[in-house]
Amino acid sequence: MNGWTSLDRFLRTDPRDVGCAEAIAMLHVYVDLVATGAPVQERYPGIAAHLRACGPCGEDFEGLLATVEGTGQS
Amino acid sequence: MLVRAARREIARRGPHQQITGPELEDLAYQAARDALLAIVQKIGQFRSESRFTTWAYKFVVFEVSAKIGRHFWRNPARSPDAEDWDRLPDRFGFDPARESEWRDLLGAVRRAVETELTPRQREVFVAIVLNDVPLDALVVKLGSNRNAIYKTMFDARRELRAALGANGYLNDEKSRRS
């Protein structure tokens, strides 16, 4: 990725982005759906948009999904 | 169970955070303890929309995030307020050999940060973009919360994009250039 593309992506905002509070509130529901292979990005596009853009919430999503899968829940 | 989950989550993030050994164990126990307190306090809010364990593990992950955010300030690489604009090209991967192509753009970014952003937006932009302060660490530093800092940065990104667009930068043709 070149610098123009990287800067362009960084500055691009998605109007569907629900923000951290709503994403965090629904994260356990979202992760369970991902773990079961449900079409979660279509069901929760605003959360999906947020998790793509927000590093810390994306990290929490990855961590919770890894925990669920690591404990054999899924 | 919570300690094991916390330990695993810190280890998953560990290579990047450089938290290992006794420090990892200490953080894991602290995160598990605080997660348990949160679970007990909020158990009445559980609505069976997910498995209970997924809901409970969420608090472990959140506590790990918060503790790693605080851990950052034990040995920060630089002051969150320092404004080293020379770091901007590297931050976005601009090729130094092609400086003539991007010098104007990054000059415009700097001008937009200085003229279009509010003092709070500018403070958050400088900390996160120029100084690589993780968002959760900045939350601790500013006594704020993740949602507020993210929203501040979200608005700053939108303002900067609009300003750059109005001045002819960041159009699709330029973005595609290698």
Image (cartoon, coloured by chain):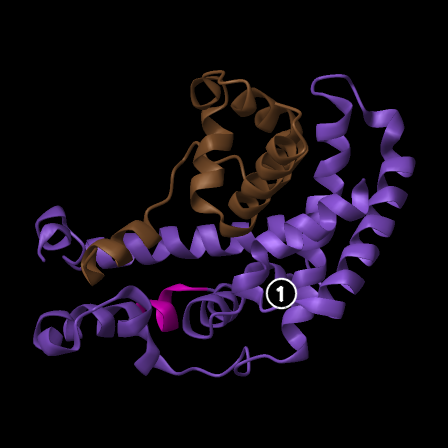
Chain A on-screen colour: brown
Q: Describe the element under mark 1 as helix, strand or loop.
A: helix
In the rendered image of the structure, the colour used to display chain B is purple
The region drawn magenta spans B112-117
Front position in the image: B112 or A35: A35
The image position of residue A19, as x and y in percent, is: 55, 40
Up-down relation of residue B92 to residue A68 (above or below)? below
Residue B165 falls within the magenta-colored stretch:
no
Q: Which residue is mark 1?
A: B137
| Camera-side residue of B9 and B83 | B9
Residue type at mark 1? Answer: Ala
Write the residue at 83% across / 26% down. B45
Q: Residue at x 58, y 35 (%)?
A: A65
Side of B150 relative to B158 (left or right): right
**Neighbour tally class for label 1: few under 14, some 14-19, many 20 plus, Cα within 10 Å:** many
Q: Quadrant of the N terminus of chain B?
A: top right
Q: Is residue B145 visible?
A: no
Most foreground residue, B159 or B91: B91
B166 sits left or right of B56 in the view: left
Quick check: A38 above or below A16? above
